[in-house]
Amino acid sequence: MIEARGLVQTFQSREGKAKKEVRAVDGVDLDVAEGEVVGFLGPNGAGKTTTLRMLTTLLKPTEGTARVAGYDVVKDSVQVRRRIGYVSQSGSTGSLARGGDEVVDHGMLYGMSQREATERGKQLFDQLDLPGLWTRQPKAMSGGQRRRLDIAMGLIHEPTLVFLDEPTTGLDPQARANLWEHIADLRRRRGATVFLTTHYLDEADALSDRIIIIDHGKIVAADTSDNLKAQVSGDLVVLEVSDPDRVADAATRLESVAEQVTVDGSHASGRVRRAAKAVPGLLRDLQAADIDLESIEVKRPTLDDVFLTLTGRSLRDAEASTEKADPETSKEK
Amino acid sequence: MRFLRESFIIFRRQLRMNLRNPAWVLIGLMQPVLYLFLFGPLLKPMAKQFGYDNAWTFFVPGMLVQLGMFGAFFAGFGLISEWRDGVVEAERVTPASRTALLMGRLWRDLLQLFVQAMVLVGLGYAVGMEAPARGVVAGVVLTLLVGGACAAASNALALTTKSEDSMAPIINVVMMPVLLLSGILLPMTLGPKWLERTSDFMPFRWIVDAVRSSFLGDFGNDKLLWGTGWAVLLFALAMWWGTATFRKENA
Ligand SMILES: Nc1ncnc2c1ncn2[C@@H]1O[C@H](COP(=O)(O)OP(=O)(O)O)[C@@H](O)[C@H]1O
Ligand SMILES: [Mg+2]
């Protein structure tokens, strides 16, 4: 569905008098298969939106090529546009228009008849929990409702490939959870391929089959969430030993299956690859050596651990630093 | 066909939003009325000096072009807030023709101008303007061309600056010489020779002259030719510029 090779986008930005070239996207390769839900994860300013705008024909790549839904984004942009739906980060509805009108007009620009677009729009309003909002102005809607209206616009022409740019940013937890349901539905009900960007780890984790991590305009990893976590750091296993004197012995046993073993009071902990497989053996080992445990805890690594291992900083720190360096992106609605 | 349909969708969307705003309708209709009744009387006693027997026949065509140019200059401001709402990007991601995205908006501006022109001409006749019907038709068509050119340029400027704050001063800078050198309010022949020569370089002056002579029913002179030429040229240039900005990435 998506096949991108060496995508580059540079922007000229002015810093005082000096002109500076920003490589917002710096050599991105992407492959997305039909029916996949892919999460495009990265801190603010990593280049997610810029990549998406190239894939949706809104921005011409400075370098590189991309085929989307079977067509080249530069040479056959109209063909690409017909087949994709795009929900932009900043929304897409005029604040003075009315919800239903916006959706119908949008569908008509895709060549649908007014009747067809109205019928389908009403259906989408039902499915997306927007009852009674057909004639309401977007400015009088809640953030979650407005976001769902954006999604209805992006889906009006039944695209087989949907791009969602930060669909839940700025929403409260309940509205986010609700929107996740609807996004999961996109594939369940319509078999759509979904490419969504996010800077929330839990969102990427919850929604996507596969996660592609981008940082400073470059792809740093692409795999399933489980594989990424397994590949990078292993699970954290924490043993609480009943007899504090035996902690050192327990740590030695742990070392046979774990890395980075540390001891703290009556706790010994270490990183174990595929802990689910290793822990039963470890427990037998400890029993054979007469070491009793108060408790054992296995923590799956988070995507933040993954990001930390790959880039040397945690996603949260990356956010903070880009926001400081780049007031533009934090200003973005 | 597809182009017309897409333009119509955009046009209808714009018109719908405007008509829901009573202030827009009211101000649009009041503009010609106020011009005519607050400024007209000032000119009346001077008309003889310009060589016009009927002050209204001099005044209404000038007002017409002024409405056409100045209303349209501001058309782009609405586009900036639409751009900020993400509407322009949402339209650009559809397969619709980029020219249609501009054209639909121009139709709205032209319809507004047409209604205002009708009000102005109607009131003009009511207060005693004397002008042949075909002259008025020609004058209104010229006005629509100029208005379309200004609206297209204003939309292009809006998408280029993307900020009301940087657009407003540019419009002011353009508007000043246009207003002063096109003889809209007072004929340029009133001033010294050098001023009149300077105004020869102002395309809008030729258009104002053309509309005036067509209102006089004077089709025989080359004023009309020059004015029409300029109006067509400006319209073509502005359309080209406007379409280019809608086509441009990053808009
Ligand atoms: N139109 C633009 N002009 C100049 N710089 C831009 C523009 N759009 C994005 N950038 C810069 O490119 C980088 C990537 O931005 P973006 O793709 O929006 O990141 P993300 O969506 O991951 O937060 C940022 O440093 C941003 O400031
Ligand atoms: Mg973004």
Image: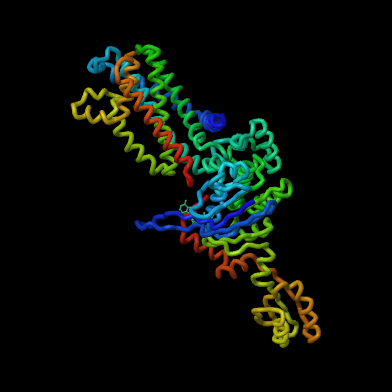
Q: Residue at x 41, y 21 (%)?
A: B141
Front in this rendered view, residue B132 or A287 = B132
Q: In this image, A311 relative to B237: left or right?
A: right
Q: In this image, A156 relative to B178: left or right?
A: right
Front in this rendered view, residue B48 or B247 = B247
The picture places residue A90, in percent across and down from the top left corner, at: 55, 47
Front in this rendered view, residue A244 or B29 = B29
Q: Tell me if residue A39 comes above or below residue B71 in the rendering.
A: below
Q: Is residue B20 visible?
A: no
Q: How is the image coloured?
A: rainbow
Q: In this image, A209 relative to B194: left or right?
A: right
Q: How many marks?
A: 0
Q: Is residue A71 visible?
A: yes
The picture places residue A174, in percent across and down from the top left corner, at: 66, 52
The picture places residue A105, in percent across and down from the top left corner, at: 59, 35
The picture places residue B230, in percent across and down from the top left corner, at: 34, 27
Residue A316 quadrant: bottom right
Q: In this image, B240 relative to A196: left or right?
A: left
Residue A290 quadrant: bottom right
Front in this rendered view, residue A106 or A246 = A106
Q: Tell me if residue A264 comes above or below residue A14 in the rendering.
A: below
